[in-house]
């Protein structure tokens, strides 16, 4: 069984910063892509950023230049550094990680429980 535990959300003023973390634990052989998604009230779940095992990154256009995704493969952890936050960044943020439980196994996507980010204007 694999669990993803998120931390780092909270309330911040516009222009401020937050750093989200998401650590995977359990019977893990390998993790490929890691990512962060957001869901604001009344809006669809959408990709914020993703990072491959080799470090290639992909960002939503709305966060480019403000957010940075990174990972620590030794700790099975993905981070999202959020700078210059805006009120429209307010949402619940979810991490996901593609996990293989054994050598040759398929990668299965696991999700964190979500962490609230609220940006006050």
Image (cartoon, rainbow, N blue to C red):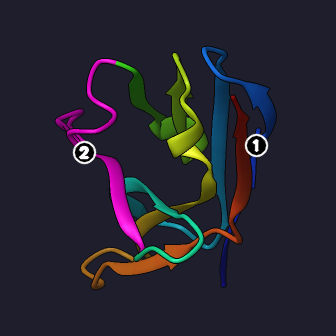
Which quarter of the picture shows residue 97? bottom left
Q: Residues within 10 Å of mark 2 (few under 14, many from 20)?
A: few
Residue 53 is a magenta residue: yes
> Which mark, residue 94?
none
For the residue labelled by badge 1, is the local secondary structure a helix, a strand or a loop? loop
Residue lying at 52% horizontally and 77% vertically, measured from the top left: 42
Going from the N terminus, do you reach mark 1 or mark 2 first?
1
Residue lying at 54% horizontally and 30% vertically, measured from the top left: 86
Q: Residues within 10 Å of mark 1 (few under 14, many from 20)?
A: some
Decide which of 58, 78 is in the foreground and name it: 58
**What residue would you read off at disc 2?**
60
Residue 83 in the image: above or below residue 12: above
> In this picture, which residue range is highlighted in magenta?
45-65
Decide which of 101, 21 is in the foreground and name it: 21
Q: Taking 115 as reference, is 41 left or right?
A: left
Residue 60 is a magenta residue: yes
């Amino acid at each position: 069984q694999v669990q993803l535990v998120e931390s780092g959300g909270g309330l911040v003023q516009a222009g401020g910063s937050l750093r989200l973390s998401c650590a995977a634990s359990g019977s893990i052989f390998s993790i490929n892509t890691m990512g962060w998604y957001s869901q604001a009230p009344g809006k669809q779940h959408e990709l914020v950023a993703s990072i491959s095992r080799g470090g290639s990154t992909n960002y939503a256009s709305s966060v480019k230049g403000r957010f940075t995704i990174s990972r620590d493969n030794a700790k099975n952890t993905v981070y999202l550094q959020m700078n210059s936050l805006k009120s429209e960044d307010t949402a619940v943020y979810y991490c996901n990680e593609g996990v293989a439980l054994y050598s040759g196994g398929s990668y299965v996507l696991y999700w964190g429980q979500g962490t609230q980010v609220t940006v006050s204007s």
